[in-house]
Image: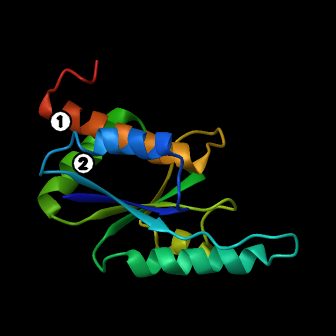
Amino acid sequence: MKVRLLAVGTRMPEWVNEGYQNYQKRLTDDIRLELVEIAAGKRAKNTDVARITEQEGSAQLAALGANDHVIALEVGGKAISTESLAESLRLWLPQGRSVSLLIGGPEGLSPAAKQRADEQWSLSRLTLPHPLVRILIAEQVYRAWTLLKGHPYHR
C-alpha cells in the first residue's frame, strides 16, 4: 500500500527533509510513504489568494489517482489517535488502494480539494507549520505501522 503526502510547498529546510526521510526509510514494502510536492503560488501584496489556493488545489487533484482514498488535513477535521490511524491502516492494507493526504498551503486547502476528500482529519487544534506536518505525518504512519507489527517502537 502506498501512503502519499500531497503537500503544497517545495524547497524545505534540510531538517524537514531529514526528519521526513528518517521515518520514510523505516517502512517496509507493505506500506510505502511517498511525498509529492506541489509548487506554492507566488504571493505578493496584491495577490488574489483565492485564485492561488484554487490553482494549488487543482494541482493536488491532478496528482491524485482515480481510486485514491483521499484525506484532507484540516483544523476542523476529525481528531484521530495513533491507535485509530493504525486501525485505518489495517483496514486499508488489503484493499490495495493508495491513501493520499492533502496538506494545503499558507491559506489551507482549496474548496475543491476539501470536496474531493473522503474524510477530513485534524492533527491538532493548534496551527502547525506545514513543513512540520510532513514530519509529523511520517512519524505517525511509522508509529501506526509499528503498532500493527507488534514492534516495540510504540510504547
Give the residue at the far right of this rendering: 46
Can residue 142 be seen at all in this image of the molecule? yes
> Image point 41% across, 66% down: which residue?
118
- Marks 1 and 2 close (CB-CB < 8 Å): yes
User: Element type at marker 2?
Assistant: helix
According to the image, label 1 marks what residue?
148
> Image point 16% across, 62% down: which residue?
95
Q: Quadrant of the C terminus?
A: top left
Q: Is residue 87 left or right of residue 50?
A: left
Q: Is residue 78 left or right of residue 149?
A: right
Can residue 141 be seen at all in this image of the molecule? no
Give the residue at the far front of this rendering: 14
What color scheme is it? rainbow
Q: Neighbour class for label 1 at 10 Å: few (<14), some, many (≥20)?
A: some
> Image point 53% across, 72% down: which residue?
113
According to the image, label 2 marks what residue?
89
Q: Neighbour class for label 2 at 10 Å: few (<14), some, many (≥20)?
A: some
Q: Where's residue 34, x and y in %?
A: 31, 58
Amino acid marked by disc 2: Leu
Q: Is residue 51 left or right of residue 63?
A: right
Upstream in sequence: badge 1 or badge 2: 2
Tell me the distance, in whole angstroms, between the alpha carbons under discs 1 and 2: 8 Å
